[in-house]
Image (tube, rainbow, N blue to C red):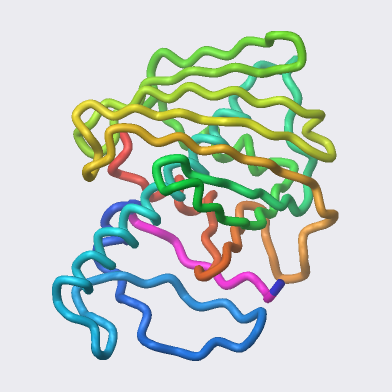
């Protein structure tokens, strides 16, 4: 994996709206292309198809940010007797039911304090949070205000959180969030080892995107209330 590039987002939606589209390139095998979307269109692309790309890319970015944030926050805020992720580099494979099961694999550097830092940034913006164990499963529920919509999030995770864990999160939005009424994300995660040189806790690397630092992202999210 390439060294983690980083950028902070001053709000997940505003970042998605002001980014730029990917222009036609011929990537080398194994290379990563920066994720971009926006009002300019790739060479030879019609305005209508460019607008579709912008909307789709914005939704993908928003979906990724929300799901990653809520998973991190949920795992961080579990009671003391619940397991926490082992520090180091985690590989996470996700799939979205609303996108036809399209999947994405990304790596996240988790530090000893990363989850706690994410939890500290919640600032009480999500209400009715609850966590409980059911055998080897961990279940949680939360209600959050996001971009003028009320999001009800329910999730279930299982695993040892030392080497592996898996889970599913279902979110429903009232009214719909940027056209999305609901979102179901499945995730399988495994511990790879120590974080790579140049990475810091909170760094996320995913195919097609530069590094996102979730810790910094959580400090600059005015849109989630």
| Magenta residue check for 110 | no
For residue 142, which quarter of the picture?
Answer: top left
- Whether 139 is drawn above or below 96: the answer is above
Name which residue lies at 54% across and 49% down.
215
Horizontal arrangement in the rendering, residue 113 relative to residue 59 (left or right) = right
The magenta segment: 2-10
Q: Residue furthest front?
A: 100
Q: Quadrant of the C terminus?
A: top left
Q: Which residue is rendered at x = 25% and y = 39% of the image?
A: 177
Q: Nearer the viewer, residue 89 or 6?
A: 89
Q: Position of residue 22 (x, y in %)?
A: 37, 79
> Does residue 172 appear left or right of residue 214 in this picture?
left
Residue at figure coordinates x 30%, y 75% from the top left: 20
Q: How many marks?
A: 0
Report x, y in % for residue 216.
Answer: 49, 53
Q: Main secondary structure of the magenta part?
A: loop
x, y percent for residue 131: 58, 14
Above-or-below relation of 60 to 35? above
Left or right of 214 on screen, residue 166: right
Quadrant of the rendering where the N terminus is positioned? bottom right
Residue at 28 percent of width and 33 percent of height: 181
> How far across and down, in percent of the image, does residue 87 sit?
78, 45
- Inspect the magenta stretch and tell me whether residue 9 lies in it: yes
Is 58 situated above or below 123? below
In the figure, 119 relative to 80: above or below? below
Task: Report the residue that reaches farthest toward the left.
Answer: 47
């Amino acid at each position: 994996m390439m060294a983690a590039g980083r950028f902070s987002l001053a709000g997940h939606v505003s970042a998605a709206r002001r980014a730029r589209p990917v222009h036609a390139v011929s990537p080398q095998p194994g290379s990563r292309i920066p994720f971009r979307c926006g009002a300019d269109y790739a060479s030879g692309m019609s305005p209508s198809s460019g607008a579709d790309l912008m909307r789709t890319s914005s939704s993908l970015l928003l979906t990724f940010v929300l799901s990653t944030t809520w998973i991190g926050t949920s795992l961080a805020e579990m009671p003391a007797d619940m397991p926490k992720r082992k520090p180091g580099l985690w590989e996470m494979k996700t799939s979205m039911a609303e996108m036809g099961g399209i999947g994405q694999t990304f790596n996240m550097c988790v530090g000893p304090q990363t989850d706690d830092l994410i939890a500290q940034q919640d600032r009480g913006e999500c209400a009715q949070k609850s966590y409980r164990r059911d055998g080897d499963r961990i279940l949680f529920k939360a209600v959050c205000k996001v971009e003028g919509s009320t999001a009800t999030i329910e999730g279930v995770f299982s695993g040892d959180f030392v080497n592996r864990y898996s889970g599913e999160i279902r979110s429903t939005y009232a009214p719909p969030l940027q056209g999305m009424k609901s979102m179901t994300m499945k995730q399988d995660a495994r511990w790879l080892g120590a974080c790579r040189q140049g990475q810091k806790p909170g760094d996320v690397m995913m195919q097609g995107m530069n590094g996102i630092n979730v810790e910094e992202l959580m400090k600059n999210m005015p849109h989630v209330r």
